Image (tube, rainbow, N blue to C red):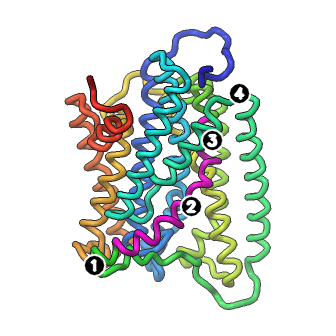
């Protein structure tokens, strides 16, 4: 049984650039969002990264982070992860592999992702997503991959229910504004490993923090499921056929994320003052609405790819990074450890504006990964992490 959706009506040929560009463009671009969010988290040793006493430009920057970045990057990761599972299975199907072999390959690959995640968390970053997505990938491979179209429509129902719940949350938050009580900050989570004075102390803290963090990420399977649904219809490979769907997804997805994130963004910037209960509800709304940014951002990348007849330097560079997104993601964690950790260069805290410094470092590190990806692409070499994962999954080349 193929992972493709039901047979489609005949159509004209799809441009090669459209088929190849959009998924890789989305993966390469999402790494910038993830970089900005993670750098802010490291600088302020909190999740999400929030300047506790913003002044001047930091207020505006914090506002934009809450509107466009915090809790809005990992859903892009989740959508593209689900999309990628179908792409990998489809390649195996095309090679003539039987369903049992395809399932075995995908399960083995995701088990290795869990191992990658543990090593990543222990050595570099407690906020690892690889382990959780390895678990998600195993569940999706065994329970969702070979299901029919009718079953996969359940994902759309779940998203509709989530939208209704988010709307109800928004109404409750609006009602809470102006409630009596002293002004309270957003209840962000202090992260011990990011504030640790030494590497060994940070490692010990990460080993404690990683398991619960991973468990909080596993429910992202509902976001990844939407990516699987989209991949079955080749939404990103054939964006011109899905222009209307992509347009509405971009408008509604990002619209919900921006409107839902507005209350927390105003409080985080110091432009709105509420009581503790309302601040907590605002942060919950911020997270719930953030999941809609995943399909929203991905839809934007699909619309951009639809207009690219021949990838230029920018689109080509982002696509090169997208094909090496695992290496780019791990490179970022090494950079945060070297540049921002309290026991290394600690650039954020040594500057006059930690928030601005974190942003500059994030963009610079991401640009370095883009450059490295372009150089590897010119040599037709995969990223080092992709090479290792492929070797572990498929074994040595004959």
Mark 4 / mark 1, whichever is N-terminal:
4
Q: Is the magenta stretch mostly helix, strand or loop?
A: helix
Comparing marks 3 and 2, which lies closer to the viewer?
2
Question: As displayed, is residue 229 above or below residue 341?
Answer: above
Q: Mark 3 points at which residue?
A: 225
Q: Is residue 205 magenta?
A: yes
296 above or below 239?
Answer: below
The residue singled out by tag 4 in the image is 148
Kindly identify which numbered label has been placed on residue 215.
2
Q: SS class of the residue under badge 1?
A: loop
Q: In this view, does 240 lie to the left or right of 54?
A: right
Instruction: Give the residue at mark 1.
Output: 198
Find residue 229 and report its horizontal and vertical position in percent: 64, 34
In depth, the one of 73 and 203 nearer the eye is 203
| Quadrant for the C terminus in the image | top left
Marks 4 and 1, Cα distance to the nearest angstrom?
A: 51 Å
């Amino acid at each position: 049984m193929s992972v493709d959706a039901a047979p489609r009506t005949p159509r004209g040929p799809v441009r090669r650039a459209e088929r190849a560009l959009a998924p890789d463009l989305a993966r390469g671009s999402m790494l910038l969002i993830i970089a900005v969010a993670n750098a802010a988290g490291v600088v302020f040793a909190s999740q999400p990264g929030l300047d506790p006493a913003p002044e001047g430009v930091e207020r505006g920057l914090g506002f934009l982070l809450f509107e466009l970045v915090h809790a809005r990057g990992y859903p892009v990761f989740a959508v593209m992860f689900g999309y990628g599972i179908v792409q990998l299975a489809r390649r195996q199907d095309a090679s003539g592999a039987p369903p049992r072999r395809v399932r075995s390959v995908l399960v083995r690959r995701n088990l290795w992702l869990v191992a990658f995640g543990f090593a990543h968390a222990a050595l570099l970053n407690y906020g690892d997503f690889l382990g959780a997505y390895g678990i998600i990938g195993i569940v999706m491979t065994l329970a969702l991959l070979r299901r029919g179209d009718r079953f996969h429509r359940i994902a759309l129902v779940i998203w509709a229910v989530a939208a209704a719940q988010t709307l109800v949350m928004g109404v409750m938050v609006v009602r809470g504004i102006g409630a009596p009580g002293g002004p309270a900050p957003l209840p962000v989570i202090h992260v011990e490993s990011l504030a640790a004075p030494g590497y060994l102390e940070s490692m010990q803290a990460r080993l404690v923090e990683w398991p619960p963090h991973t468990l909080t990420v596993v429910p992202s399977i509902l976001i990844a499921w939407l990516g699987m649904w989209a991949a079955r219809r080749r939404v990103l490979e054939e964006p011109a056929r899905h222009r209307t769907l992509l347009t509405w997804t971009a408008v509604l997805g990002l619209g919900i994320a921006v409107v839902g994130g507005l209350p927390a963004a105003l409080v985080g910037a110091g432009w709105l003052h509420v009581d503790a209960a309302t601040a907590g509800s605002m942060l919950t709304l911020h997270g719930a609405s953030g999941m809609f940014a995943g399909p929203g951002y991905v839809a934007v990348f699909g619309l951009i790819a639809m207009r690219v007849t021949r990838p230029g330097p920018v689109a080509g560079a982002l696509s090169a990074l997208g094909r090496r997104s695992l290496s780019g993601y791990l490179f970022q964690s090494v950079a945060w450890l070297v540049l921002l950790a309290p026991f290394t260069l600690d650039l954020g805290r040594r500057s006059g504006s930690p928030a601005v410094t974190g942003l500059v470092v994030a963009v610079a590190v991401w640009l370095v990964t883009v450059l490295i990806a372009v150089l590897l692409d010119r040599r037709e070499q995969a990223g080092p992490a992709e090479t290792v994962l492929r070797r572990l999954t498929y074994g040595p080349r004959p």
